[in-house]
Image (cartoon, rainbow, N blue to C red):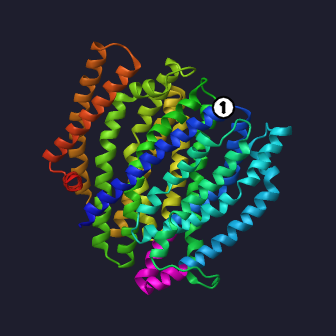
Amino acid sequence: MTSTRKVVQSAAMIAIFTLISKFLGFLREVLIASTYGSGYETDTYFVAMTATVIIMTTIGSSLNTTLIPIFTEIEEKSGKEAKLKFLNNVLNMVFFITIILALLGFFLSPLVIKVLAKGFTGEQFTLAVKLNRIGLPIIVFLGFTYVFSGYLHSSEIFGPPAIMGLPYNLVYIIFLLFFAEEGNIQGLMLTSVIAASTQFLIQVPAIKHQGYRYSCDIDLKDPYLKKTLILILPVMLGSAVQQINTIIDKTLASSLVEGSISALTYASRISDIIISVFVMAITTVIFPMLSRAFSQEDNMQIKKIMGQGINIILIVTIPATIGIFILAKPMVRIFFQRGAFDKVATYMTSQALIFYSVGLVGSSLRLMLNRVYYSFQDTKTPMLNGVLAVGLNIVLNLILIKPMGHSGLALATSISATFTTLLLFIDLKKKLGRIGLKRYLSCFIKTLIASIIMGIVVYFMYFGLVSLLPNKWIVDLLILLLSVVVGVFLYVIVCSALRIREMRILLRALIKKMR
């Protein structure tokens, strides 16, 4: 199997399971809302969950990102046995650290709840502390989950990490359907602990199949432990910087008309679906392949793998951007406009979504390029680039907020992401020499042409049918879905006619699977 076909097939598998997990997650939220409502209990539960996972999520995702190139380097230089030994060492260290964090969390729980929920007093405060303490084992389980998925990804095994969202959500759904009782929010937190444990347990068979056998040995002098610590700090700082960026945007939006924060939040979530489902799937597959090529000091292979990833991202994000430009308002109206979410909220959210989509290509490519730098074990450059992005975003926020309101904040984020992505390209060219920019530009132009043709057809089809058929929600939804399906088919046909290589490989892989 060619590397391009492997990327396409593995990314498609991850994207499918991610979509299923997203759907199950949505069903989970609906069931929580229908069982416990939206008030005292659920507010307390969500705050307690945030207090439980907020630190470990940042540390864990940074650890996962850092471990993949290190695991790959160890395997290339010292073999699989050394890699398994390092896995055992890291696992014991993570277990030790997470136990300490859980114990600290138990004693500091009242303080953490006071910081996260200043308005909680009396019984609600006591309940939040109790729920937080019940959920503390999640910290340990998350640590195991990120270490196992890092090892499997470094071995280019993507199945178990991709499906771990399924048992996680199914545990919730089974509890909520058969065992949940209104007023028993403690049962929901206990279910959260059990659900979190399934995320690492489902990866255990694959880890054992790799030959891993647990032992209590800890080698504090292992040079790779020190290397992990050095590399993980910039990644964590970069993640923290992005959180600061979000906080600044919401703080500025709070000075605008009512509903601005909600509009930005909903629009950001819609835009993030494309990144979390499709782009993350691509970068998840590409990252370990890049790390292996770097360990082998094969620059030609690095450029080839990177080129495949970038072109596939362009194939996904450019038509998505055009589609959002055309269908932003109908999408928001169909999926959100009901109850308190009125026409004004629909307009504000759709405007924010349009301006966020301007930076969709840039944001997606930056995610990809960050993985390229991480595969080089260069975590400092993405961190500095992230700091620059936040600084530029703040300046643009202050310039655009007055004439454009909340839409200006969305546009500032898009411009910042696109500009800093270009800087990453320039710096990468200095590191690797010629990286095939002409090939990327050719793919960009061809994909843009196909997307514009698709966009024109979708525009006339959707708005033409809407004007002719009854003005009902179900009719509007069916027209939207039909327009999207026709647009996708047309886009694939035009891309194939324009001889976009990655699209043709994707089609061949799909046809082979169908046969």
- 316, 421: nearer the viewer: 316
Viewer can see residue 423: no
Q: Residues within 10 Å of mark 1 (few under 14, many from 20)?
A: some
- Residue drawn at the location 30% of the way across and 49% of the way down: 314
The C terminus, quarter of image: bottom left
Rendered location of residue 90, percent (x, y): 59, 75
Relative height, residue 156 to residue 514 (above, below): below
Magenta run includes residue 69: yes
Q: Which residue is mark 1?
A: 37
Would you say 391 lies left or right of 318 here?
Answer: right
Q: In the rendered structure, which segment of residues is drawn in magenta?
A: 67-86
Would you say 415 lies left or right of 228 here?
Answer: left
Magenta run includes residue 409: no
* Quadrant assignment, res 141: bottom right
Residue at far front of view: 178
Rendered location of residue 218, percent (x, y): 64, 82
- Residue drawn at the location 41% of the way across and 42% of the way down: 359
Rendered location of residue 466, percent (x, y): 31, 17
- Residue drawn at the location 46% of the way across and 72% of the way down: 69
Residue at far right of view: 122
* Quadrant assignment, res 351: top left
